[in-house]
Image (cartoon, grey):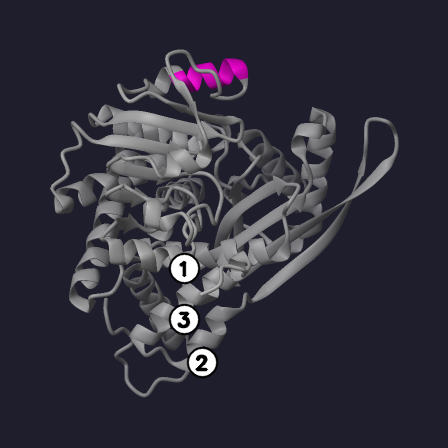
């Protein structure tokens, strides 16, 4: 298989693999192969120099059979339609897998926020929400933070939408500050979900986490918190990197100190007591657990044969290509696929949305406890099917997810069914 395909072709390949094992109705597969709608918008923004610059934005809603669509908005110079479509589809499969009542969506604006002033960034955010307002809402489509967007961005989104509607609408977005309806645990939720699934996988693999070595690719929010939580379980973080470069110490790196160093210096490069390391060296390092927490398509068919990790927990979306997936499966590497491993983020986003709708808020312990139950339950469903069907674990995850979406589509009458037995698996 050639790896000269784009990110959306990866999604279609993953869909094909699961559909073949499920003997999926071709009509269902056709509905899942393309998003329901994709809105393209132009956003004129007055820059600080008085000139008008027009930014391009997208919002894609993939499937809403299970409920309103849900997904992040990223601000990045390389945002494009295929990327947004792929991320929206992954969100559909992710929400279905963990059993929350959402479909998938994704959005983005083609820009470099590092080159914008705070005022320009705020005007861009408010302009983007004005442009997509007809398509979103607490019961239609709920945005969230993603690459280069954060609590402040979500606050602007919520405020602008509330002005448009003439009523305070905290349930429009998730990932907000606590003071305006955010949830405890949201900032670290993706990583906490990774920690729960790694813990469950370690039991199966008979891997002692008190002596396990961990490598983190991408020391951003998900990567740094994953390192912290795994370190608290007793793991030894031996390497980490970001876009600036990587650091390595076989005796272990304190993730909290590394995070503080990055906050002070802007990157991890040069952290005291470590050696520099390339991205290739980091991915192929001898370790027990590898956590890819950067961008998609990082573990390719060329790199996969050199992987030495026993367990890979995909904190990023789509870090492993289909060709690499096959190679790693044949090598016996246990992968916790992205739609399972990093589903903690959308799960706690769901909790935030529920709290906004009821205007009743939970403690951090309540949030963590509810998240743990959902993540462990989802992991067990996937693992049981993986053992039963003798497929790789990613295919098993997609089978569980697609089966639930199929049941919803049939129940709603989107595709006719002769019997009332909607689900084969669940």
* Residue span colored magenta: 258-265
Q: Residue at x 15, y 38 (%)?
A: 207
Residue annotated with mark 3: 16
Name the image quarter holding residue 154: top right
Instruction: Assign a secondary structure to mark 3.
Output: helix
Q: Quadrant of the C terminus?
A: bottom left
Residue 48 screen position, x and y as percent = 82, 26
Mark before the other along the chain sequence, 2 or 3: 3
Instruction: Assign a secondary structure to mark 2.
Output: helix
Residue annotated with mark 1: 322
Q: Nearer the viewer, mark 2 or mark 3?
A: 3
* Viewer can see residue 388: yes
Q: Nearer the viewer, mark 2 or mark 1?
A: 1
Q: Residue at x 40, y 47 (%)?
A: 303
| Label 2 CA crowd tier, 10 Å (few <14, some 14–19, many 20+) | few
Residue annotated with mark 2: 27
Q: Quadrant of the N terminus?
A: bottom left
């Amino acid at each position: 298989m050639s790896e000269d395909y784009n990110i959306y072709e990866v999604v279609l390949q993953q869909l094909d693999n699961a559909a073949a094992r499920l003997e999926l109705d071709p009509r269902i597969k056709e509905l899942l192969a393309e998003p329901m709608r994709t809105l393209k918008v132009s956003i004129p923004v007055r820059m600080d120099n008085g000139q008008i610059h027009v930014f391009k934005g997208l919002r894609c809603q993939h499937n809403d059979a299970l409920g309103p669509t849900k997904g992040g908005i990223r601000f990045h110079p390389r945002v494009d339609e295929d990327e947004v479509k792929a991320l929206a589809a992954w969100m559909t499969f992710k929400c279905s897998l963990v059993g929350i009542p959402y479909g998938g969506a994704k959005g983005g604006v083609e820009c470099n926020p590092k080159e914008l002033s705070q005022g320009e960034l705020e005007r861009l955010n408010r302009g983007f929400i004005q442009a997509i307002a007809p398509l979103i809402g607490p019961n239609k489509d709920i945005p969230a933070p993603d690459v280069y967007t954060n609590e402040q961005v979500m606050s602007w989104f919520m405020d602008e939408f509330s002005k448009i509607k003439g009523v305070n609408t905290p349930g429009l977005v998730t990932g907000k500050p606590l003071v305006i309806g955010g949830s405890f645990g949201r900032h670290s939720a993706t990583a906490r979900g990774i920690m729960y699934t790694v813990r469950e996988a370690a039991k199966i693999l008979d891997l002692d986490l008190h002596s396990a070595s961990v490598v983190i690719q991408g020391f951003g929010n998900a990567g740094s918190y994953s390192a912290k939580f795994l370190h608290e379980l007793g793991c030894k973080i031996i390497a980490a990197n970001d876009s600036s470069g990587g650091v390595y110490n076989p005796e272990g790196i304190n993730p909290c100190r590394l995070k503080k160093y990055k906050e002070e210096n802007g990157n991890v490069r040069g952290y005291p007591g470590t050696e520099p390391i390339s991205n290739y060296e980091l991915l192929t390092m001898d370790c027990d657990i590898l956590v890819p927490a950067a961008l998609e398509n990082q573990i390719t068919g060329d790199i996969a044969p050199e992987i030495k990790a026993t367990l890979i927990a995909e904190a990023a979306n789509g870090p492993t290509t289909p060709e690499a997936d096959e190679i790693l499966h044949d090598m016996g590497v246990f992968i916790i696929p992205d739609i399972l491993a990093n589903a903690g983020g959308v799960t706690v986003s769901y909790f935030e949305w529920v709290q906004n709708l009821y205007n009743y808020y939970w403690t951090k312990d309540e949030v963590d406890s509810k998240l743990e139950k959902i993540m462990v339950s989802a992991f067990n469903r996937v693992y049981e099917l993986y053992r039963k069907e003798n497929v790789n674990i990613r295919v098993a995850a997609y089978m569980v997810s697609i089966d639930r979406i199929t049941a919803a589509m049939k129940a709603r009458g989107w595709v006719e069914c002769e019997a009332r037995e909607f689900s084969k698996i669940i």
